[in-house]
Amino acid sequence: MKKVSIREEMKRARKTHGIWYDFCDHMKKWYFIRRPTVHFRRGKVINGKRSFKEFSSTKMIGFRAMCRVDAYAEKHPEIKVITVDDAFHAGSSVVLVPHPKMGITVIYIPQCATDDLNQFFMYPHCSATMIEEIAKMKKKCQWPRWGYK
């Protein structure tokens, strides 16, 4: 097996996940959790003294989050936002972020904070739009690795 440098591996990861990395970098200004830096010493993992912001989609709730994603998606047309309803039947968003040759990340952003944060409702036109957008992304993603058609 050929040895691959870290730089080459990072370039390859950037080609596949670059859209997602850029989305996370932009959104972690508002939606993040703090993680400690990690060091490896003598085969052990040690938490560092400093911390960094890591994007967390679980923090994305409410109209402001939806507006921020809409504004970002306008400048990045490869990202699609589909309107759905949350548990209170308020307009909410499903965000589709493609990873070329890999797949799609899906984020649900409810407009109202409820106990059912992982539930949404789709009217027929919403489901048709989602099916259409996923089909388009599937063609662009070209998933030959796993043999899906």
Image (cartoon, rainbow, N blue to C red):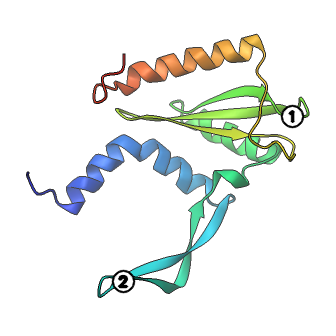
Q: Which amino acid does label 2 sit on?
A: Lys
Residue at the image position 69 percent from the left and 52 percent from the top: 58
Q: Is residue 26 above or below residue 80?
A: below
Q: Quadrant of residue 86?
A: top right
How far across and down, in percent of the image, does residue 77 sit?
54, 30
Mark 2 burial class by Cα count in 10 Å: few <14, some 14-19, many 20+:
few
Q: Which amino acid does label 1 sit on?
A: Ala
Would residue 4 appear left or right of 50 to someone viewing this image?
A: left
What residue appears at the point 41 percent right and 46 percent down from the top-left corner?
A: 18
Task: Nearest to the eye among marks 2 and 1: give it.
Answer: 2
N-terminal of the pair, mark 2 or mark 1, is 2
| Residue where numbered disc 2 is placed | 44
Residue nearest the viewer, comparing 118 with 75? 118
Q: In this view, does 89 lie to the left or right of 69?
A: right
Q: Distance between the residues labelled 2 and 1?
A: 45 Å
Check the image and report above or below for 92 versus 42: above
Q: Mark 1 points at which residue?
A: 87
Residue 128: image quadrant is: top right
Horizontal arrangement in the rendering, residue 115 relative to residue 17 (left or right): right
